[in-house]
Image (cartoon, grey):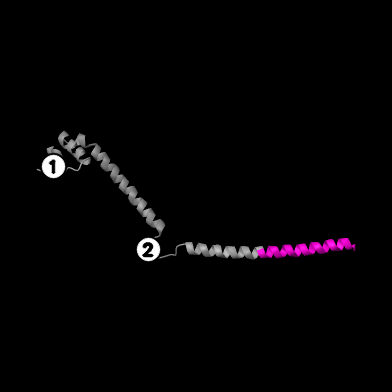
Amino acid sequence: MDPTLKDILTENRQAAHETASVLSNHSDLLRIIVERQDQLIELLTPKEKDGPSLDELLGHVAGQLNELTGYARQIVKTLGGLEQNLPGDIARAVVALLGSTKTAAEAVNGRGNRT
């Protein structure tokens, strides 16, 4: 075999060995990184416990808010129809009461004195 060709093959074998060594080191590093990542995920993930999960609690709160929104809409609708369903003076007094700190009696009476 030609000495130059033999030198090239030797260099290629050495380069291949170095490359394999570097890839082995990278593989070890990636394995360590994945292990650490798994440990972090485990630490950040809440443990199972007694009682409802956060998702269940938030779902319950969202359901209650939805129900309360329906009640609020019904109240607004009812208050909007007060002028049609009640005598004028009472309706105006209730509407005025909603925007003031007067009691119902004061609003109907038209003065600051309670009756």
Q: Position of residue 29 (x, y in %)?
A: 63, 64
Residue beneath label 1, please?
Answer: 105
- Of mark 1 and mark 2, the one earlier in the sequence is 2
Residue 50, compared with residue 78, is above or below; it is below
Residue type, mark 1 in image:
Ala
The furthest residue to the right: 2
Using the image as rendered, state which of residue 88 and residue 6 is in the foreground.
Answer: 6
Closer mark to the observer between disc 1 and disc 2: 1
User: In the rendered structure, does residue 86 fall within the stretch colored magenta?
Assistant: no
Q: Position of residue 84 (x, y in %)?
A: 20, 34
Residue type, mark 2 in image:
Gly
**Bounds of the magenta segment:** 1-25
Q: Which mark is residue 51?
A: 2
- Circle 2 packing at 10 Å, graded few (<14), some (14-19), many (20+), is few
The furthest residue to the left: 115
Q: Position of residue 91 (x, y in %)?
A: 18, 36
Q: Position of residue 56 (x, y in %)?
A: 39, 57
- Circle 1 packing at 10 Å, graded few (<14), some (14-19), many (20+), is some
User: In the rendered structure, does residue 10 fall within the stretch colored magenta?
Assistant: yes
The residue sitting at 32% across, 46% down in the picture is 69
Local SS, label 1? helix
What is the spatial separation of the Cα atoms under label 1 and label 2, in whole angstroms? 48 Å
- Number of callouts: 2
Residue 110, compared with residue 48, is above or below; it is above
Using the image as rendered, state which of residue 65 and residue 111 is in the foreground.
Answer: 111
